[in-house]
Image (tube, rainbow, N blue to C red):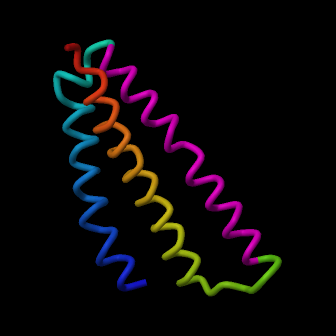
Amino acid sequence: MFITGVVLIPIFIYFLVILFTFAWGKAGRTEQGKKVLNKSMATAAPILPIGWLLLESYHSIIQSLTLSTYRDTMWVLIMLTFIVVGASILRRKKSAVPA
């Protein structure tokens, strides 16, 4: 899990900053910005519940997980959710700019 943390944490922080600067900035307050935020959140919404379902299924059917492993995996799911939201904002923001 150490390698996962070393790789994911900088990416997570980068996309978290993108999310907050967009949501709290001028672009996030416009109607187009609100649409971008809503679509980005909708894109990332299934990650946590589906990941949790898979984790619980693995825990109950295949092998019991320790609390530490369970906790670390949940943090990875949370970080992945925010990474997808930030990446989706970047992608949608670029395509939403009028030409």
Q: Front-most of 68 and 61? A: 61
Q: Position of residue 7 (x, y in %)?
A: 31, 73
Q: Total number of numbered labels?
A: 0
The picture quadrant where one finds residue 88 is top left
Q: Using the image, determine if residue 4 lies above or below residue 18.
A: below
Image position of 15 (left or right of 78):
left
The picture quadrant where one finds residue 20 is top left
Q: Residue at x 28, y 29 (%)?
A: 93
Q: Using the image, determine if residue 98 lies above or below residue 13.
A: above
Q: Quadrant of the N terminus?
A: bottom left
Q: Position of residue 78 (x, y in %)?
A: 46, 59
Image position of 54 (left or right of 26):
right
Q: Residue at x 17, y 28 (%)?
A: 25
Image position of 48 (left or right of 24):
right
Q: Quadrant of the C terminus?
A: top left
- Magenta residues span 32-59
Q: Using the image, determine if residue 23 lies above or below residue 59.
A: above
Q: Using the image, determine if residue 65 lies above or below residue 49.
A: below
Q: Position of residue 85 (x, y in %)?
A: 39, 44
Q: Mostly what secondary structure, the magenta segment?
A: helix
Q: Position of residue 55 (x, y in %)?
A: 67, 69
Q: Residue at x 59, y 46 (%)?
A: 46
Check the image and name the residue furthest to the right. 61
Q: Residue at x 29, y 78 (%)?
A: 6
Q: Magenta stretch containing residue 48, yes or no?
A: yes
Image position of 25 (left or right of 96):
left
Q: Magenta stretch containing residue 75, yes or no?
A: no
